[in-house]
Amino acid sequence: MNSSLYFGEVSHHRKSPKSHHLRYRLYMPHLFLDELNEVFQGHWLWSTAGSNLSCFRRSDYHKPEVSSLEDAVRSTMSKQIGRPVTGPISILTHLRTFGYCFNPVTFYYAWNESRDQPTALMAEITNTPWHEKYAKAFSWSDSDPSDSNQTKQEFKKEFHVSPFIDMGVEYDWRFKKPGEKLRVDMILKRANEIFFSAHLNLRKKPINSFNLGWSLLRFPFLTFRITFGIYWHALILRLKGCPFYPHPKHASSSTSHE
């Protein structure tokens, strides 16, 4: 089985207009979609079909109107990249736990047939508080074909994610190939100056009874805590005096409003 668990931490670092930092521990399952029927067999608190204490539910992920998540992801990747995406697909995400699921970002990897090298990547972001979804796909080798262990993608912001960051932003996203370690760096720039960065640093663990039990014991309300943390830190940013940017569809411009 190629599916696994990843344990580690996420951190955010804001330099302007006010300094603010956060860091918290977490775990994320990394599941190959063609292994969903077997990945949690024998683990009675976990499931990929029906409800459970922790479960994978198709409706929580990309294009829920499409019955097959694998088909939906492959179709979006192929359309955005401009070539057919083949091979196995995996998902790095949070599962529905105690009936609740929220994913600020979910990552999908397309692999070669031997499952040792990504060929494409898609990040799907859910914004807060609007709960809209945005998917961005890349060819893994676009940035540096000479280094197959990482990819770097730079592009202009296209989707309103946070009410504390405006649309005039350039993204610099960097991904290390999932292996014994997994790293994601999302760097935000304005006028070529870094003002915000988010980092995901994880270490791989096998899916077994001990690691599944530890993940629930150590992080029983992880998805609730993530949502609470978003609003809590939003309050802190507001109290610090950070400008508030309304959703562009509710404003004639992205000018900040107090």
Image (spheres, rainbow, N blue to C red):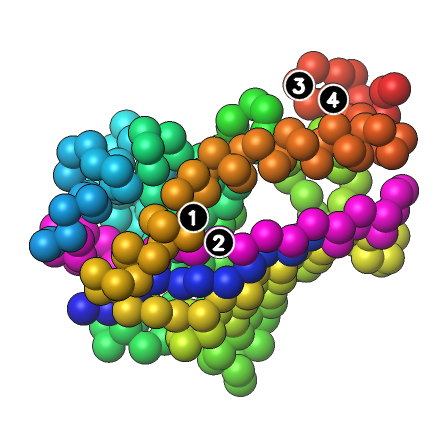
Q: Residues within 10 Å of mark 2 (few under 14, many from 20)?
A: many
**Range shown magenta:** 13-40
Q: Residue furthest front?
A: 217
Q: Which residue is mark 3?
A: 249
Residue in view at x 54 percent, y 33 percent: 227
Q: Nearer the viewer, mark 1 or mark 3?
A: 1
Location of residue 55 with respect to 107 vertically, above or below: above
The spot of residue 174 in percent (x, y) is 60, 65
The spot of residue 75 in percent (x, y) is 32, 46
Query: 6 or 43, which lies in front?
Result: 43
**Could one spot residue 108 in this view of the protein?**
no
The spot of residue 211 in percent (x, y) is 30, 62
Residue in view at x 76 percent, y 45 percent: 169
Of labels 4 and 2, earlier in sequence is 2
Let me know if residue 17 is in the magenta part: yes
Q: Nearer the viewer, mark 1 or mark 4?
A: 1
The spot of residue 42 in percent (x, y) is 10, 54
Please state, as top left, top right, bottom left or bottom right, where the C terminus lies in the image. top right
Q: Which residue is mark 4?
A: 246
Q: Which residue is mark 2?
A: 26
What secondary structure is found at the residue carrying circle 4?
A: loop
**Could one spot residue 106 in this view of the protein?**
yes
Q: Residues within 10 Å of mark 3 (few under 14, many from 20)?
A: few
| Tag 3: amino acid | Lys
* Labels 1 & 3 near each other (Cβ < 8 A): no
Q: Nearer the viewer, mark 4 or mark 2?
A: 2
* Labels 1 & 2 near each other (Cβ < 8 A): yes
* Labels 3 & 4 near each other (Cβ < 8 A): no
